[in-house]
Image (tube, rainbow, N blue to C red):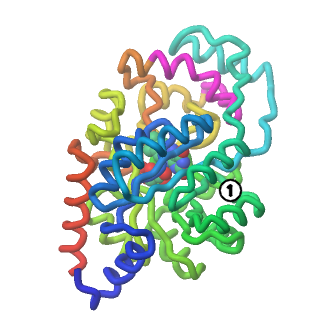
């Protein structure tokens, strides 16, 4: 690498600060980030990552132990900042249950009574594990937790989908902003769920705007899945690129084969942002269920996490049967670029290609 190139020099400075050899971060992906994937990315010089949203404290500790056994690289543990409790509406939920019966097993009324793992207990587990980085999405950690994180010298990476969110995160003490463009696969990280489908900013507009608005380093995420995307993101001011969908076809991701295969053939216009799986807007492949559930005659999905509970039986059956029509097939708009290769090869190919473009 040549440090005379300011774009590469910025990425090198970021790598030096976080003990990386390559400015590529595996995106935290709840339900799709086995330690095997992080180990492969970290051993190739990138950053491993765990989306711990759905994990109990014990499972978070097991993940970290497995990661540390497989790699001495740093890693990122990620949580969602909880939304206010959902308002329930039995009649509306009945309409969703009736609709879902056309797509899977009958849904019991109690299926909507889901209680996600206790956030405070998850936070304690994160501090106990003591990763290099703790990241957030959907909001900001409470100030006392930020103080405790900083006392342990853990860095805070905060996901932002708008300039206003990025500035709020910096003011709250975030060490790095992760600028999430609306191309991104999975849930959109809008702090206010009600704005997730109206404030849809693409990465080419969002990234330079956030870089200009904050003093801390910015990581780019959303629709980056090849060397061109990485080179573009770094040129637009990012210090590193965070990739989710681009790693989901790697064997270490252990994805349902129908989902991994569909990622390989999905064009940008064949994904959509929908509340139909969880109640929070997220980008998924426009599968048969996703299209039917977003049609004008479909019932309005219940709020998060009620909808997640209501769709659980369908999603479980779909994964078991490897049925892409009903799988919760999160995917970013650059899905087609994802390589079905070991993750270490992906990291090496992407970074060597980006360096060639940046020279
Ligand atoms: C399957 C899946 C699960 C995700 N889960 C989380 C999560 O738990 N926490 C989070 O901060 N972001 C999550 N995301 C968003 C990613 O961190 C990242 O923003 C996104 O993957 C970037 O876009 P790309 O998929 O086009 O690379 C998820 C994305 C996917 C595809």
Counting every numbered tag in the picture gives: 1
Q: Nearer the viewer, residue 283 or 38?
A: 38
Q: Residue at x 68, y 48 (%)?
A: 124
Left or right, 77 with respect to 148, comes to left
Position of the N terminus, as image quadrant, is bottom left
Image location (x, y in percent) of residue 116: 68, 33
- Where 244 falls versus 154 (above or below)? above
Where does the magenta region start and end? Answer: 297-317
| Residue bearing mark 1 | 139
Is the C-beta of the residue carrying label 1 under 8 Å from the nearest atom of ligand 1? Answer: no
Image quadrant of residue 216? Answer: bottom right
- Where 309 falls versus 267 (above or below)? above
Position of the C terminus, as image quadrant, is bottom left
Task: Mark 1: give few (<14), some (14-19) or many (20+) Cα within 10 Å.
Answer: many
Image quadrant of residue 214? Answer: bottom right
Image location (x, y in percent) of residue 25: 40, 59
Q: Residue at x 54, y 62 (%)?
A: 201
Image location (x, y in percent) of residue 52: 56, 43
Q: Residue at x 32, y 64 (%)?
A: 229
Q: Is residue 276 magenta?
A: no
Question: Could one spot residue 237 in this view of the protein?
Answer: yes
């Amino acid at each position: 690498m040549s440090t005379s190139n300011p774009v590469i020099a910025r990425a090198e400075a970021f790598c030096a600060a976080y003990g990386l050899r390559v400015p590529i971060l595996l995106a935290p992906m709840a339900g799709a980030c086995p330690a095997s994937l992080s180990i492969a990315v970290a051993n190739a010089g990138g950053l491993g990552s765990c989306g711990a949203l759905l994990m109990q404290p014990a499972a978070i500790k097991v993940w970290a132990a497995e990661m540390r056994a497989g790699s001495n690289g740093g890693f990122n543990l990620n949580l969602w900042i909880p939304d206010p409790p959902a308002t329930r509406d039995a009649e509306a939920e009945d309409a969703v249950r009736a609709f879902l019966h056309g797509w899977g097993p009958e849904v019991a009324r109690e299926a909507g009574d889901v209680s996600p793992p206790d956030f405070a207990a998850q936070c304690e587990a994160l501090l106990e594990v003591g990763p290099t980085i703790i990241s957030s999405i959907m909001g900001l950690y409470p100030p006392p937790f930020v103080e405790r994180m900083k006392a342990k010298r853990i860095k805070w990476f905060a996901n932002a989908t708008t300039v206003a969110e990025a500035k709020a995160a910096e003011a709250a003490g975030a060490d790095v902003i992760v600028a999430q463009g609306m191309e991104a696969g999975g849930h959109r990280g809008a702090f206010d769920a009600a704005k997730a489908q109206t404030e849809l900013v693409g990465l080419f507009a969002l990234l330079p705007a956030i870089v200009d608005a904050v003093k801390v380093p910015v990581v780019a995420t959303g629709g980056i899945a090849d060397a061109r995307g990485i080179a573009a993101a770094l040129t637009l001011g990012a210090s590193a690129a965070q990739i989710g969908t681009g790693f989901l076809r790697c064997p270490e991701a252990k994805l349902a084969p129908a989902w991994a295969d569909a990622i390989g053939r999905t064009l940008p216009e064949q994904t959509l942002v929908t509340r139909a799986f969880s109640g929070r807007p997220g980008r998924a492949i426009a599968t048969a269920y996703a299209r039917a559930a977003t049609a004008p005659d479909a019932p309005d999905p219940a709020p998060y996490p009620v909808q997640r509970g209501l769709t659980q039986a369908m999603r479980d059956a779909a994964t078991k049967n490897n049925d892409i029509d009903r799988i919760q097939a999160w995917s970013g708009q650059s899905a087609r670029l994802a390589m079905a290769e070991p993750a270490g090869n992906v990291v090496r190919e992407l970074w060597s290609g980006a360096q060639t473009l940046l020279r």
